[in-house]
Amino acid sequence: MSQPDANVYYVPHKSRWPIIATIGMFMFMLGAANWLNGHDTAGQVILAAGALTIIGMMVGWFGNVIRESMKGTFNSQVDTSFRMGMTWFIFSEVFFFAAFFGALFYIRTFTVPWLGGMGDKGALTNGFIWQGFSATWPTNGPDAVGGSFISTSPWGIPLINTLLLLSSSVTVTIAHHALRAGKRKPLIGFLGLTILLGATFLGLQAHEYWESYVHLNMTLHSGIYGATFYILTGFHGLHVTLGTIMLIVMWLRCARGHFNREHHFAFEAVAWYWHFVDVIWLCLFLFVYIL
Amino acid sequence: MSSTAQAVHHEEHHQSFFERWFMSTNHKDIGTLYLSFSFLMLFVGGSFAMLIRAELFEPGLQLMQPYFFNELTGMHGLVMIFGVIMPSFVGLANWMIPMQIGAPDMALPRLNNLSFWILPFAFVLLLSTFFMPGGAPAAGWTMYPPLVLQGGESIAFMIFAIHLMGISSILGSINIIATILNLRAPGLDLLKMPMFCWSWLITSFLVIAVMPVLAGAVTMMLFDRFFGTNFFNAAGGGDPVMYQHVFWFFGHPEVYIMILPAFGVISEIVPTFSRKPLFGYKAMVYAIACIAFLSFIVWSHHMFTVGLPLGAEVFFMYSTMLIAVPTGVKIFNWVTTMWRGSLSFEVPMLWAIAFIVLFTIGGFSGVMMALVPADFQYNQTYFIVAHFHYVLVGGALFSIIGAVYYWLPKWSGRMYSNFWAKLHFWSSVISVNVLFFPQHFLGLAGMPRRIPDYNVAFADWNMVSSIGGFWFGATQLIFVGVVIHCVFFSKQKAAARVWEHAYGLEWTLPSPAPHHSFTVPPVIDDSQLAHGDVSH
C-alpha cells in the first residue's frame, strides 16, 4: 500500500478536457436521440459534432497525459492508480457483456422451452397462445419473425476468427516481452502483427455479417436468435475495433520511443484490454456459435 | 514530482470562477458540486412528489390527466435515485474519503471532474422529455417493456440519459476504489479504516458490477424500439420477463448502493455522540460485505407475481430473508454502541437515531414482503410504496441530512444554527411518519400504487398522507436556509474537532479543511482513529 517514494503527494493540474468530454458526450447522445426519432438532419449534425468533439478530446486529453508522463510527472503511486482504474474499467466491461450473456442463457434455458410447452407454466402458454410451436435453437420464435433463416456454421469464419484472436493474444504478449527486454525490432514487428490480426478479424466478421444478411436471411429482425447473435457479436466487434485503434496508437508510440523497459503502463493497459476482448470472444464462440 | 504539491497550492489563489468549478481537480470543490446538484434535484424530484400527493389529496381527478400522473411517478423515481441519493453519497465520498484516509485528493482527480459533469447533462436529456411530443416516459422508474416502449420521443432520450448516468457512477466508483486502495496513509490498514470508507469501498464494487448490466438492459430496449429486434417480444422468441430479470439484477444491488453508504454515515455519527468506539467494528465490516454479496442473489423478489417457477420463488424468498441477518447485526451494533454510552443529542445524532428507527420499520416491512404468499397480497399496493420510502427517505435521505449536519462545520468552518437545525429535524421526523405511515394501511386495504384516482374508501388516509407530504416538503426549505446561513453568513467559527468525541483523521485538519487535504502522508496514531483500538 505505502509507496516508498511517495513522501509528497501528486495532484494533477486543472484540465479543460473533462468538461469538453461531457459536452461531446452530451451532443453525441442528443444527436443520436434526435436522429432515432426521425429528425434526421439535425440529429446527424449534432451527432457528428459530438463525435468530433469526443475524438478531439481524446487526442487532447491523452496527449496531455502522455506529455506529462514523458516528463516524469507521475510517481509510482499515480502509476498504481492508473492500473487500478484500468482494471476496474475492464471489470465493468465484463458485466456489460454479462448482461447480454445472461439474456441469452435465460432465453435458451427458460423462455424458448416455455414457449414450446415445458412444464406446467409452459404447457398453458404453449396450449393457449403458441400452439404448434416446438422449442428449437436457433429460433425466431412462434411467429417466425423475420422469415426463415440459416445460422452461420461455427466451423468456417468463426473458427478462423478464433484462431486469429488467440494468436493475436500471443503476439501482443511476445511484443510485451520484447518491450521489457528492451528489444525494439521484435516489439515493433509483433505489435504490428497483432494489429494486422485484429484488422483481419474485423474484415472477416464484416464479411460474415454481409453473408448472413444477403445470403442466409439472418438479420437483426430474425427473432431472438438474430437479436442475441448481433448484439453479442456486434458489441464484441465494436470492442475489437476500439482495441485495434488503441493498438495502433501504441504502435505509433513504440515507434517514437515513448516507452522504456520499466515505464510502459499504457502498453500494458491496452494489452489487458486486448486479452479481455479475446476472452469474451472465446465465450461467444462457445455459447453463440457452437452450442 | 516533488514540486507538484506546492504548485497546486500556488495555483489555488489564482483561479477564475470557471476554472474553479468547471476544470476542477479538487475533491472538495467536486464534492460541493455533487452535493449542490443533488440538493437542487431533491427539489425537482420533490416537486414531482408534491404534485403526486396533491392529485391524491382526494378521490377523483383534480389537477392532471392520468398520463401526466404516470410521467410524474416514473420521473420522481428516476430523479430521486439517480439525481439525489446516488450523487449526494458520491459528494460525501468526495469530501470525506480523502480526509479520512490521509490523502491529498482523489486518486484520479480529472476523472472525478468528468464523473460529476456528466450528471447535469444527463438530467438535461432526461428532464427535457417533459416537453416532447408524447411526454416523459410514463411506465415507472423500472421502465418495463412493452409498456415503456409505447411512449413517444422520450424513450431514446431516457435510454441515453441512463447510459450517461451509468458512465458517471461507474467512473466515480472506479475513482473511489482506487483512492481507498491506493491512497491510504502508511499504517492505515484496511481494518483501521473509518466505516464510511468501508461502506463506500463495497458500494463502489456494487456500482461497477451492476451499472453496466442496467446499460445492457436499456440497450436491448433501444434495439427493440428502433432496430427491429425481439428481445422482449414473445412472438419472436423473446420475453418481457427477461427484461425484468436483467433489470433487477441491477436493481437490487442498486437498492444497497443507496443504503450502504448510509450505514457508513450512521456508523460514524453514533460512536461520536455515544462517546464510545463503534461496537463490533469488524462485524460491521463483514456485515456490509455479506449484504453486498447477498444483494446479487435476491433480485427476483421484485417479481414474485410475474409467474416464476415455484423453485425460484422459494429460493428467492429464503435468500431475501437471509439479508435480515447481517442487517440485524448492524442495527444491534448501533444500539449496542449507544448502550451505556454518554449520549448527547446534537443534531447529527438526532438524525442518526431517527435513521435507525425508521430504517428498521422499513426493514421489517421488507421481511414481510420477502414471504411469497404474503407478497402476492402486498404486490403493487401502497404497502410497497410505504416500505421503500421508509428505507429511502427515512433511511438514505435522513442519513445524508445527518451527514451534512455532522460534517458541514468541517467543510465551511462555521457552525449552523442549532435552533433551526433542530426545528428542521423534529418537523421532518414527525411529518415523514404522517406522510408514509398511513400508506401501510392504504396498501393493506388494497389501494394500488401508480394510480391517480382511487376508491372513496381510501380517502381519509390519503388526505392525511398528503398533508404529511406537503408538511415534509415545506420543512426541507428550512434545510436550505440552515445550509445557506451556515456557509455564507454564520459568525460562529467551528473548531478543528467540531464534536467533542469525534475521532478520525478528518478532525485533525483545521475547519474549514485546507484546499488539498494532506500534502504529505500523515502519521497514523491509532488512539486518534475513529474506532479506537480494533486489533482485538
Image: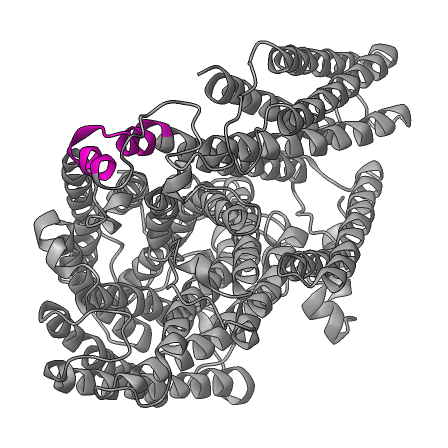
On the image, the x and y values in percent for residue A154 come to 55, 13
Q: Is residue B527 left or right of residue B5?
A: left
Residue A286 is situated, as x and y percent measured from the top left of the image, at: 48, 16
On the picture, is B302 further left or further right than B96?
left
Q: Which residue is drawn at 24% across and 59% down?
A: B276
Q: What stretch is highlighted in magenta?
A: A108-127
Give whichever of B334, B23 is nearer the camera.
B23
For image coordinates 56% across by 58% down, the residue present is: B156
In this rendering, position of residue B42 left or right of residue B6: left
The quarter of the picture where residue B56 lies is bottom left
- Return the residue nearer the eye: A52 or B535: A52
Residue B425 image offset from top left, x and y in percent: 29, 81
Farthest residue toward the right?
Answer: A256
Q: In which quarter of the image is the C terminus of chain A?
A: top left
Residue drawn 36% across and 41% down? B234
Could one spot residue B1 in this view of the protein?
yes
* Residue A126 located within the stretch drawn in magenta: yes
User: Residue A199, position in %: x, y?
Assistant: 76, 23
Residue A87 appears anywhere in the view: no
